[in-house]
Image (cartoon, helix red, strand yellow):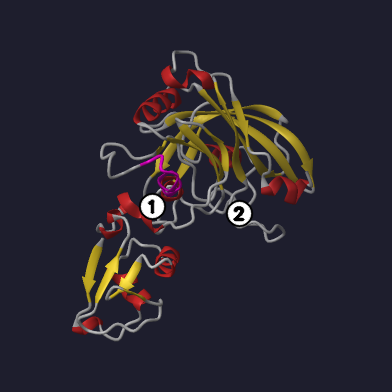
Amino acid sequence: MKELTVTKNDAGQRLDRFLAKAVPLLPASLCQKYIRLKRIKVDGKRADRDTRLVEGSVIQLYINDEFFDTPKPENAYLTVSAPKLNLVYEDDNLLLVDKKPGQAVHPHDGAEYGKTLIDHIQAYLYAKGEWRPREEHAFAPALCNRIDRNTGGIVIAAKNAEALRILNQKIKDRELEKRYLCVVHGRPKPAAGRLEGWIFKDAVQNRVYVTQKFQPGAKSAVTEYRTLKSQNGLSLVECELITGRTHQIRAMMAAAGTPLLGDGKYGKLDKQYDRKFQALYSYRLKFTFTTDAGILQYLDGREFQVEQVDFVTQYFGE
């Protein structure tokens, strides 16, 4: 239990508004709940959220100690009162989450603390009691791969240090097969094939360039694709990343003359279609281990898929 004494400068404020400043890690909805449950009292008595505070009054808070920590990226999960996750799969070692376009995976992508995918994953595991940050100072649930803010699809999160180590190594060794769906302008020629080239990243402009000749700093890039359907000037294409470079599919499809629908960075926004960001989704994941996977060996050969991708229905009626 913690106690806060109301000072002269705080007198006259509503209880809930005072607590929002005094305990910033406590979500507003959880604060209201704790007031109703009498886990937050004023001078030892029940209070309402709109109770006006008086100088010298003592507020008793029967809430977890971590809510009194200083706000920082590492505890942003505490600000999430109702985690929202689209789970594709979960076991004792990992989570597969279907991230929707528009959500950042980490705070450094420009998102507010408490609104990123990792914040919601950590809040989810904290609420379930599977992760106890006060007891596990060395490890916090972490993402093994990332997806651009405006791209959707499967993101892998490790629940323990051993799973994180193994998955990071398997991704590095390309023992995971990832397939994407995208919508492009026009029809790829040929209908199925292999795109190869060199990708050079311009960090200042946060974009990449595809060249057919090597240049210093460039990395090789290979994308295999097949056209699934074409209609109304658009094509639904499945892509497999043989390499995993920044913006690889977006840049290589644009360089091939078939830019992604809604991709203003590598193509152009077409007012004919209601799409303001790239139609790209990491919809299928398969574990294809060629070496020992330790505690994750049971995943070898297993495949997971997002069943509904918004732009497939929107533009192709499937």
Q: Earlier in the sequence, mark 2 or mark 1?
A: 1
SS class, disc 2: loop
- Magenta span includes 89: no
**Who's the residue at 32% across and 65% down the image?**
24
Principal secondary structure, stretch drawn in magenta: helix
| Three-letter code, disc 1 | Tyr
Which stretch did the figure color magenta?
123-131
**Who's the residue at 42% across and 66% down the image?**
37
Question: In which quadrant of the rendered image does the C terminus lie?
Answer: top right
Q: Is residue 70 above or below residue 95?
A: below
SS class, disc 1: helix
Identify residue for label 2.
268
Task: Residue 153: give x, y in percent of width and height.
Answer: 57, 41
Q: Residues within 10 Å of mark 1 (few under 14, many from 20)?
A: many
* Residue 145 sits in quarter: top left
Identify residue for label 1.
77
Q: Which mark is residue 160?
A: none
Question: In which quadrant of the rendered image does the N terminus lie?
Answer: bottom left
Most extreme residue toward the top, as rendered? Answer: 291
Apparent side of residue 168 relative to residue 273 in the rendered image (left or right): left
Task: Residue 113: give x, y in percent of width and height.
Answer: 38, 57
**Who's the residue at 48% across and 32% down the image?**
244
Task: Residue 273: give x, y in percent of width and height.
Answer: 70, 57
Quick one: 48 or 102, which is closer to the camera? 48
Task: Residue 123: give x, y in percent of width and height.
Answer: 42, 49
**Who's the residue at 36% across and 65% down the image?**
39
Mark 1 and mark 2 in contact (Cβ < 8 Å)? no
Quick one: 137 or 255, which is closer to the camera? 137
